[in-house]
Image (spheres, coloured by chain):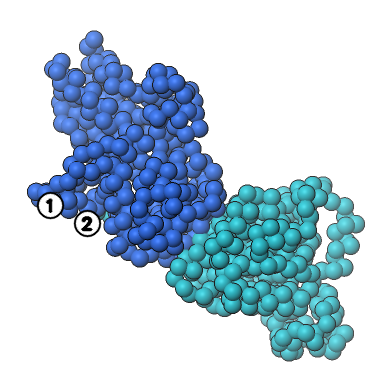
Chain colours: A blue, B cyan
């Protein structure tokens, strides 16, 4: 899992800076790596992730694009097929829908459809999630949709270590990898090892051990879930919190080991409930660990509305700590 | 027929080769249609009757190191590029000896050995890929030409405009080859485009362009030489519109309700093979014996391809999910 190296030295950083450092490090390590997307260069990135990289690496490798999501995503696929290691940045998951043809019909299919003659070693990064009052066309969480697609891998870094470490591993992968960065995490600060580096991209992690219930989540919801676990602990309920990290493939083993121990599970997912990633995880638990369960599997998802603008309605639409606490208590038949 | 004087390589040998390539495509696809009715080939089958002069005129002008992106009507492009007819036919059968391991079928012929980056069955979907292949070339300084074939139906797609803009904006060596056969499946050009002079659209993106009679193989080759030379020298895109006509149905499921038989017959008089052959014979460059010999050679090659496909094997179902991802351990970080 996370590096075993001794971390004697740490530094204060943010999620945003950790992603930036990951890009910088990748570009230094491998001259085939380049970043391409809307406003990644002169503007410094919509969320300021790539700020400063243009002057360091120049306009060929920090490549501003027109507002042509399908065009430049397809160009990233083509460049990857021809030996480059592109990082395509899509401003938000909502805009990624304009590139969905290329992601689904090309990136995800080419290796299989060509009988393994061509692969697409491409990384696509994008912002996802709500919480900044950006309303119904900039706030959705569609990573669960993408996790439906065989041929791609889907990551959701929730921690500074993963923000720093997943990119390089994803670039080493011979197949397309999508990385979803929750918008509410960019400003998150904390300590990160000075020597932090690549991490695995296929294992879930227990972020907080517990014996009473498994709370399974990823991305921006991880921190709300950990907060819920702290509140529950004060009431004598020891929740185990699992960060999925990879939404495709899903690390079933880590989930089932946890559920076998706690015998109860609640899944927290910022996507809409119907047809959600939470539904998939729930189904897997029912398929693989049904006889371990002491209560029905619970879900805390976004309400089934386009995300609204006003703060109080936006908050009400999303998974929040009180809802997670309530769902956990329901599973434990406590009130 | 275009006057030969201003065209390079008008040797008898070259003329015979152009003729042979076109007949080879026509007869191969004729066999495919026959095999389709026998249910040896299933799914969609899109044949190229009437359009052969384009693939034959353009592709041999490219170098081996150059790359090609094609559409779902791409048997001709694969054959002319040098993908063996045996593996193309096996692919049509869905056999694992096929050029895409049988996974792609008629619409998805791929061949790494000849830099044939595939039949793409999303109209317009190949254009951004071509831009990306060219971007990689630009960053690696390889001086390649990326030839991207697409029909005029693709012109209505956003990806067409995005790709032309990107290629011009970034100075990328893409040769855009529009195979304008006047129908996007059953939708006539006049029903889908406000500006029907397709090559003019390139000017909006400051891309040099040319329209050519796509049923005149000599004219297509001459235009392709100019185009490939321009791309190679300038490292900039070029747009070649080849005006042609699809003489057969869009696919095997198409009853052709959208056009009159008389229209098809009128175009049949311009069809590229008979036209070229008659011109060659009138100029005493080719004799009927040559044609008979060519046809016999091709028929033998087709028979061999069919035998190869028939003898091919089905991939075991255990291999079904293989190559959804690469065969290798998932990276584990450092």
Where does the image place residue B273, in percent across and percent down from the top left? 79, 73
Question: Disc 2 marks which residue?
Answer: B334
Q: In the image, B316: left or right of B202?
A: left
Displayed quadrant of residue B297: bottom right
Where does the image place residue A192, in percent across and percent down from the top left? 19, 45
Displayed quadrant of residue B283: bottom right
A265 and A70: which is toward the camera? A70
Q: In the image, A170: left or right of A41?
A: left
In the structure shown, which secondary structural element does the residue marked by tag 1 occupy? loop
Q: In the image, A204: left or right of B285?
A: left
Kindly identify which chain the residue marked by label 2 belongs to. B
Residue found at x 44% / y 21%: A310
> Mark number for residue A5?
1
Residue found at x 59% / y 69%: B236
Where does the image place residue A69, in percent across and percent down from the top left? 52, 48
A290 and A174: which is toward the camera? A174
In the structure shown, which secondary structural element does the residue marked by tag 2 occupy? loop
Residue B238 appears in view: yes
Looking at the image, is B257 positioned above or below residue A186?
Answer: below
Residue A247 appears in view: no
Residue found at x 35% / y 29%: A269
Q: In the image, A229: left or right of A314?
A: left
Q: How dense is the environment of label 2, judged by Cα within 10 Å: few (below 14), some, or many (20 and up)?
A: few
Residue found at x 15% / y 15%: A235
Where does the image place residue B329, in percent across and percent down from the top left? 29, 56
Displayed quadrant of residue A189: top left
B226 and B179: which is toward the camera? B226
> Mark number for residue A37?
none
């Amino acid at each position: 899992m996370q590096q075993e190296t001794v971390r004697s030295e740490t530094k204060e950083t943010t999620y945003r800076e950790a992603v930036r450092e990951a890009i910088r490090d990748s570009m230094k390590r491998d001259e085939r790596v380049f970043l391409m997307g809307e406003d990644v260069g002169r503007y410094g990135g919509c969320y300021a992730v790539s700020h400063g990289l243009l002057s360091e690496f120049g306009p060929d490798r920090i490549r501003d694009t027109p507002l042509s999501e399908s065009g430049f995503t397809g160009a990233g696929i083509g460049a990857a097929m021809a030996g480059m290691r592109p990082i395509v940045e899509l401003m938000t998951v909502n805009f990624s829908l304009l590139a969905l043809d290329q992601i689904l019909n090309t990136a995800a299919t080419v290796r299989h459809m060509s009988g393994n003659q061509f692969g697409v070693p491409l990384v696509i990064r994008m912002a996802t999630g709500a919480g900044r009052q950006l309303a119904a066309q900039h706030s959705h969480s569609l990573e669960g949709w993408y996790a439906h697609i065989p041929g791609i891998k889907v990551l959701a870094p929730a921690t500074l270590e993963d923000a720093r470490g997943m990119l390089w591993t994803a670039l080493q992968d011979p197949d397309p990898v999508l990385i979803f960065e929750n918008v509410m995490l960019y400003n998150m600060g904390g300590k990160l090892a000075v020597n932090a580096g690549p991490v695995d991209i296929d294992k879930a992690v227990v972020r907080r051990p517990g014996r009473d219930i498994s709370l399974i989540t990823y991305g921006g919801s991880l921190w709300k879930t950990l907060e819920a676990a702290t509140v529950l602990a004060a009431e004598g309920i020891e929740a185990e919190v699992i960060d999925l990290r990879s939404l495709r493939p899903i690390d079933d083993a880590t989930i089932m080991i946890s559920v076998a121990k706690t015998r109860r599970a609640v899944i927290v997912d910022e996507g809409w409930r119907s047809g959600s990633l939470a539904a998939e995880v729930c189904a897997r638990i029912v398929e693989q660990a049904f006889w371990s369960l002491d209560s029905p599997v619970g879900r805390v998802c976004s309400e089934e509305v386009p995300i609204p603008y006003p703060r109080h309605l936006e908050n009400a639409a999303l998974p929040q700590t009180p809802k997670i606490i309530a769902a956990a208590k329901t599973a434990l038949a406590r009130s | 027929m275009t006057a030969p004087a201003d065209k390079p390589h008008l040797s008898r040998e070259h003329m015979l080769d152009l003729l042979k390539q076109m007949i080879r495509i026509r007869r191969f696809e004729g066999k495919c249609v026959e095999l389709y009715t026998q249910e040896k080939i299933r799914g969609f089958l899109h044949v190229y009757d009437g359009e052969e002069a384009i693939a034959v005129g353009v592709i041999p002008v490219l170098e081996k190191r150059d790359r090609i992106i094609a559409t779902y009507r791409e048997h001709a492009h694969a054959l002319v590029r040098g993908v063996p007819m045996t593996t193309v036919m096996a692919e049509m059968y869905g056999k694992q000896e096929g050029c895409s391991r049988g996974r792609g079928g008629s619409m998805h012929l791929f061949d790494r050995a000849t830099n044939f980056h595939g039949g793409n069955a999303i109209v317009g979907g190949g254009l951004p890929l071509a831009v990306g292949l060219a971007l990689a070339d630009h960053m690696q300084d390889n001086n390649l030409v990326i030839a991207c074939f697409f029909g005029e139906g693709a012109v209505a797609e956003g990806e067409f405009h995005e790709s032309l803009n990107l290629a011009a904006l970034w100075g990328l060596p893409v040769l855009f080859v529009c195979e304008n056969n006047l129908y996007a499946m059953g939708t006539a050009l006049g029903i889908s485009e406000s500006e029907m002079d397709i090559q003019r659209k390139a000017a909006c993106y400051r891309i040099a362009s040319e329209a050519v009679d796509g049923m005149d193989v000599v004219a297509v080759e001459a235009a392709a030489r100019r185009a490939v030379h321009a791309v190679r020298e300038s490292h900039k895109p070029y747009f070649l519109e080849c005006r042609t006509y699809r003489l057969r149905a869009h696919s095997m499921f198409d009853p052709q309700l959208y056009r009159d038989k008389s229209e098809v017959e009128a175009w049949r008089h311009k069809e590229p093979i008979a036209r070229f052959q008659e011109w060659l014979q009138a100029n005493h460059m080719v004799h009927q014996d040559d044609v008979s010999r060519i046809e016999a050679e091709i028929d033998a090659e087709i028979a061999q391809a069919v035998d190869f496909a028939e003898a091919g094997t089905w991939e075991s179902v255990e291999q079904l999910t293989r190559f959804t991802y690469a065969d290798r351990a998932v990276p584990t970080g450092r």
